[in-house]
Amino acid sequence: MGNAALAFNGASLLQIRLRLIARPMNALDLASLLCSRLCHDLMSPVGALNNGIELLSDETDPEMREKCLELLEDSARATANKLKFFRLAFGAGGGFADEIDAAEARTALEGLFGSEGRIELGWVVEDEKLPKGAIRLLLNLALLAGDALVRGGQLDVGAERGAGRIEIAVRAEGPRILLDPVLRETLATGGGGSIEPRAAGAWLAHSLAAEGGGSLRLSDPASDVLMIGATIPSL
């Protein structure tokens, strides 16, 4: 696979290529699922904004007011970064164009994971633009892998177009990696029943790969490194 394959050298993968079936979900359920995930992720930075405003209104000490303003600035930045990412990963980011600037996806990932310094992001995407579906799939796979780095670490993201297909590789390595079995199952099968809000990204990634006639590859749960790969047709 070229550059993107570098993330997978030396590790075994379990093929989920078997039965990627697009499991339908009505528009109302999908909207509810994504809204629940958004509210969950925005609760912390928005709550911090509210707390900062309350502290600022009661505080008279100049030094403490400065710290309150720093808290507000950090919380506002975190909120904006999350919204930018989810707009691109879950929504209609990129407008009506068939392809999206890959640099926009990189910026969204850096804002989501790189601002706190817990996760180092490696970006191996040479194409200037990729189809919208590929960008959304890449971002959702990166979201799963980044969230699995519970104590921080290295997150490498690669994508390459060639021979009528696009290959995506995501690799996460750190002191502790935890991919919830529910997320693993949803990514592999699309979920059997009702989908939990925390599994929204896994369900969307499965659906994007399945609808395009693609395949997913996932490392063994016992592996020290989490790796997720995807291959979809390049239309």
Image: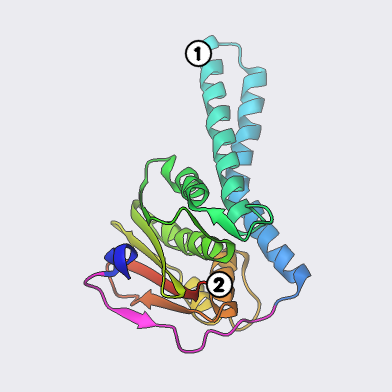
Label 1, on which residue? 63
Label 2, on which residue? 235
Dots 2, 1 in contact, CB < 8 A: no
Given residues 68 and 100, the one toward you in this image is: 100
Q: Say if the magenta span includes residue 42.
A: no
Dot label at residue 6? none
* Image point (64%, 56%), residue name: 97
* Image point (59%, 34%), residue name: 76
Name of the residue lying farthest toward the left: 10
Helix or strand or loop: what does disc 2 sit on?
A: loop
Q: Position of residue 70 (x, y in %)?
A: 52, 24
Report the amino acid beneath label 2.
Leu
- Between marks 2 and 1, how big is the CA–CA gap? 57 Å
Q: What is the crowding at mark 2: few (fewer than 14 residues within 10 Å), some, or many (at least 20)?
A: few
Going from the N terminus, do you reach mark 2 or mark 1 first?
A: 1
Indicate the quadrant containing the C terminus: top left, top right, bottom left or bottom right: bottom right
Indicate the quadrant containing the N terminus: top left, top right, bottom left or bottom right: bottom left
Q: Main secondary structure of the magenta part?
A: loop
* Image point (50%, 13%), residue name: 63
Q: What is the crowding at mark 1: few (fewer than 14 residues within 10 Å), some, or many (at least 20)?
A: few
Q: Position of residue 211 (x, y in %)?
A: 60, 78
* Image point (56%, 22%), residue name: 69
Q: Which residues are magenta?
A: 9-24
Helix or strand or loop: what does disc 1 sit on?
A: helix
Given residues 55 and 25, the one toward you in this image is: 25
How many numbered marks appear? 2
Report the amino acid beneath label 1.
Glu
36 versus 228 height, above or below: above
- Quadrant location of residue 125? bottom left
